[in-house]
Image: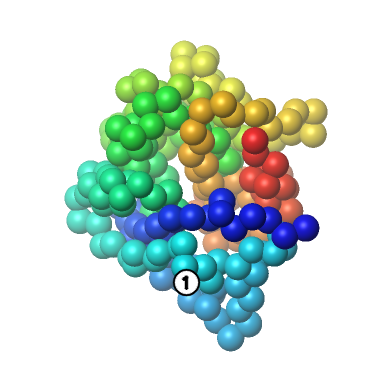
Amino acid sequence: MFCNENKMKNINIQGLAWDAKSSFQRGPAKAPALIRKALYSDSMNLFSENGISIENENISDKGDFEITEYFDIEKITREHLSKGNKILSLGGDHSVTFPIIKAYHEKYPKLAILHIDAHADLYDEYEGDPHSHACPFARIMENSFAVRLVQVGIRTLNPHQLAQAKKYKVEIQEMRLLEKLSIPNFENPLYISLDMDGFDPAFAPGVSHHEPGGLSSRQVIDIIQNVN
């Protein structure tokens, strides 16, 4: 069945060349350009399995942004949101999520988040940095920038992050229990945050923090396609 392309109206793509807050290997800053290189390679096919092509006049690619200051990410996102568009962000270590959501909160004060990841990213601070890539969801929840946070595929919970999850009432669907659980329905506007290490390393070997026993590419696609 072919899906209604009206659902794809007014989407801005923004590339975020930023990985300064990664605690281990760098590389996510290069992701936006590499994603486009792979997408538009000689083997490209711009149609998805549900019959929608991303070669669509409703999609506007704003290019890649070299980030020099962390909260420039918030300014860039706010500018694109101000035009009434939806946003697809490429690249950046996971610290980009906090300034992005800070901008979203102005437009969507009751936002829900679906977070697909191996890690909960709920540290109060990591290596002395409260804005580390390991901390964005602690900052988001303590500022009440989301009314609901559902995390899927988590497989690295330690006592501190478990305590943080309980503190902020985070709904965690651990990878070890995934077959027994299902993705809930969302009543509020939804932001989806996909960290590449949510995939099993067999499907995403280039990530910096390998965590075995993760999601397959098919499972991630199914999760996103079945969000209501």
Of residue 47 and residue 1, the one placed in the foreground of this image is 1
Q: Name above or below for residue 45 compared with residue 153.
A: below
Q: Residue at x 52, y 16 (%)?
A: 169
Q: How many marks?
A: 1
Of residue 67 and residue 59, the one placed in the foreground of this image is 59
Q: Name above or below for residue 101 compared with residue 35.
A: above
Q: Position of residue 111 (x, y in %)?
A: 44, 29
Task: Specify the farthest residue to the left.
Answer: 69
Q: Would you call the spot at circle 1 few (<14 residues within 10 Å), some (14-19), or many (20 or more)? A: few
- Residue 142 falls in which quadrant of the image? top left
Q: Residue at x 55, y 81 (%)?
A: 41
Say left or right for 27 vs 4: left
Q: Position of residue 58 (x, y in %)?
A: 46, 62
Q: Which secondary structure, mark 1?
A: helix
**In the rendered image, is residue 123 in sight?**
no
Quarter of the rendering occupied by the C terminus = top right
Q: Residue at x 65, y 29 (%)?
A: 185
